[in-house]
Amino acid sequence: MTWKTIRLELARTSEYPQGSAAHAYVLRLPLDADGLIDEEAYEAERDRAVVRRLWLGEPEQSGVLVRKRRGWAFSYAPGDDDDENIFHLETHPIRLGEYLTLTESDGEQLPFKVVHCRE
């Protein structure tokens, strides 16, 4: 297991056909050799599993990764209202070039590409 710093950037959407580096997340997560979340390491040091949301025209947000009954989410404040769910993070590897789908707090699903994944 290794704690990694990961950058996700908005992938191609109808609004951004080339994707957008100005719409991104920077994460710090424990990953195993297969690129999956190491849940044991996460449980041992939850406060290290952090996220920053970098969004063009909006203030930067800082939050944490939280385990939910039905998967994982980024959370920026107590409660579920602002949570951004991550589709199948428990089974989807985080590796350079892979894609993840996040559901924004308003319900919009957006694709993101892993553009950096480093120790």
Image (cartoon, grey):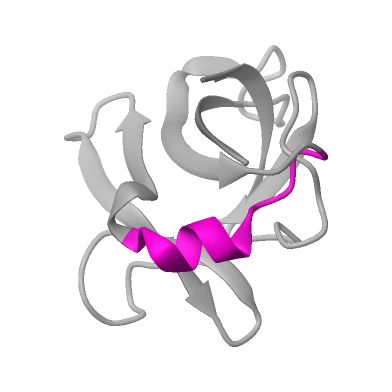
- Quadrant the N terminus occupies: top right
Q: Is residue 73 left or right of residue 52?
A: right
* Span shown in magenta: 34-46
38 falls in the magenta region: yes
Q: Residue furthest left?
A: 59
What residue is shown at x 22% (from left), y 34% (from top)?
Answer: 58
Residue 43 percent coordinates (x, y): 46, 68
Residue 56 percent coordinates (x, y): 32, 24
Is there any visible trace of residue 114 in the rendered image? yes
Q: Answer with the quarter of the image where residue 66 lies.
A: bottom left
Q: How many marks?
A: 0
Q: Is residue 23 left or right of residue 11?
A: left
Q: Is residue 112 left or right of residue 53?
A: right
In the image, 117 versus 38, the foreground residue is 38
What residue is shown at x 61% (from left), y 52% (from top)?
Answer: 102
Residue 13 in the image: above or below residue 116? below
What residue is shown at x 82% (from left), y 59% (from top)?
Answer: 91
In the image, 20 versus 100, the foreground residue is 100
1 falls in the magenta region: no
In the image, 50 versus 105, the foreground residue is 50
Q: Answer with the quarter of the image where residue 70 lies.
A: bottom right
Is there any visible trace of residue 85 in the rendered image? no
Residue 40 percent coordinates (x, y): 57, 64
Residue 108 in the image: above or below residue 83? above
Q: Answer with the quarter of the image where residue 69 lies.
A: bottom right
